[in-house]
Amino acid sequence: MTTTETAPPTTLLTRTAYLLYGVTAYVAFLVVFLWAIAFVENASIVIGGVEIVPRTIDRGGPSGGIVVAVVIDLGLLALFAAQHSVMARDGFKRRWTRLVPQPIERSTYVLAATACLAVLLWWWHPITATVWDASTPALRWVLVAASLFGWILVLSSTFLINHFDLFGLRQVVANARRRPLPPYRFVTPLWYGIVRHPIYLGFVIAFWVAPTMTVGHLVFACATTAYIFVGIHLEERDLIRAFGNDYVDYRHRVPMLVPGLRARRASRPAQARVA
Ligand SMILES: C[S@@+](CC[C@H](N)C(=O)[O-])C[C@H]1O[C@@H](n2cnc3c(N)ncnc32)[C@H](O)[C@@H]1O
C-alpha cells in the first residue's frame, strides 16, 4: 500500500512507460484472478469447441503419486505465501524502492504475485480422492452459490478499501498526471464494519464451500487458511504501525473473520494502546 506524497521528476516517456507497465500488470492480474476462480470452482468453459480452463484444482494437471503431489502442491503454496509475506512488508518496500522506482513498486508486487499464482495454477497436482460429495443437485447448487458469494465478497471488498491502489493503478496514473498521491487512508465501510478482513473471509468461504471436496482441494483449503492467519498477523502489525490507536480501537470493536464473535467477548479487558 502506498503512502507517497510527491511523484519524483520523470520524463514523459518514463511516465508513459510506467503507466503501460502498471496497466499490463493489472490486466495480467485480472486474467489470472479469473482463472483462479475457475480453478477453485472446477469450471469448464468451452469457447468454439476449445476448453479455456484446461487445468483446475481437480482436473487436468500433472499426475503423480499422492506423496509427490502433496509435496509439490505445498511447495507451490509456500512460494506464493513467501512472495506475498515478504514483498508486502514495509521494511522490504523501503529497501526494494532503491531498486524499483516508487510509482511502479505496487505494480511490480502485483506482477510478482500474479506470476506466482499462475505457476501455482499451472503446476498444481490434483489429488482426486473424495472427502465429501453433495448428493443432491439442489444442495450442489446452494454450495456453488455460497462459494461464488465468497468471490463476490473478495472483489467488492477490494473496492471498499481502494481497488485501484491495491493493484497499483492509482500510483501509475497519478505519476502519469504528475499529481501527488494523497496519503493512503484507513477506512471501515460496509463489510469492514462487520469483520476486519472481509477479503480473507471471502477467500475462506470460496475455498471451503465446495459441492465435491477432494483431498487436493482440502490440502489447498487447509494451507491457504493457515496462511491467511499468518497474513492477518503480519498485516495487522503493519496497520497498527501505520494507523496507531485508530486500528487498535478498531480491533477491539470489530471481529477478525467471524461476524459477531468479538461482540460476545466485548467485556474482555482492552489490550495495550499504542503510545
Ligand atoms: C489484500 S488486502 C486485505 C485487506 C483485509 N485484510 C481484508 O481481508 O479485507 C491487504 C491490504 O489492505 C490494507 N488494509 C487492510 N485493512 C484496511 C482498512 N480497513 N483500510 C484501508 N486499508 C486496509 C492493508 O494495509 C494491506 O495493504
Image: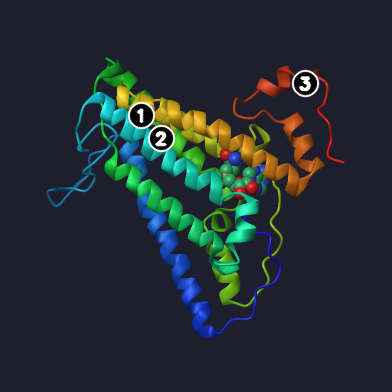
Residue under the image location 34 percent in, 43 percent down: 120
Q: Which amino acid does label 2 sit on?
A: Leu
Comparing labels 3 and 2, the label whose residue is closer to the camera: 3
Q: Mark 2 points at which residue?
A: 148
The residue at the far left in this view is 49
Q: Mark 3 points at which residue?
A: 266
Tag count in the figure? 3
Q: Position of residue 18 (x, y in %)?
A: 50, 73
Q: Please state, as top left, top right, bottom left or bottom right, where the N terminus lies in the image.
A: bottom right
Residue under the image location 50 percent in, 41 percent down: 154
The one of 101 and 147 positioned closer to us in this rendering: 101
User: In 3D space, how far apart are the residues under numbered discs 3 and 1 (Cα atoms)?
Assistant: 35 Å
Residue under the image location 68 percent in, 60 percent down: 3
Q: Residue 63 carries which label?
A: none
- Of pointers 3 and 1, the one earlier in the residue sequence: 1
The answer to whether 248 is drawn above or below residue 184 in the figure is: above
Whether residue 248 is visible: yes
Left or right: residue 253 versus residue 54 is right
Q: Residue 144 carries which label?
A: 1
Residue under the image location 42 percent in, 43 percent down: 79
Q: Which amino acid does label 1 sit on?
A: Val
User: In 3D space, how far apart are the residues under numbered discs 1 and 2 (Cα atoms)?
Assistant: 6 Å
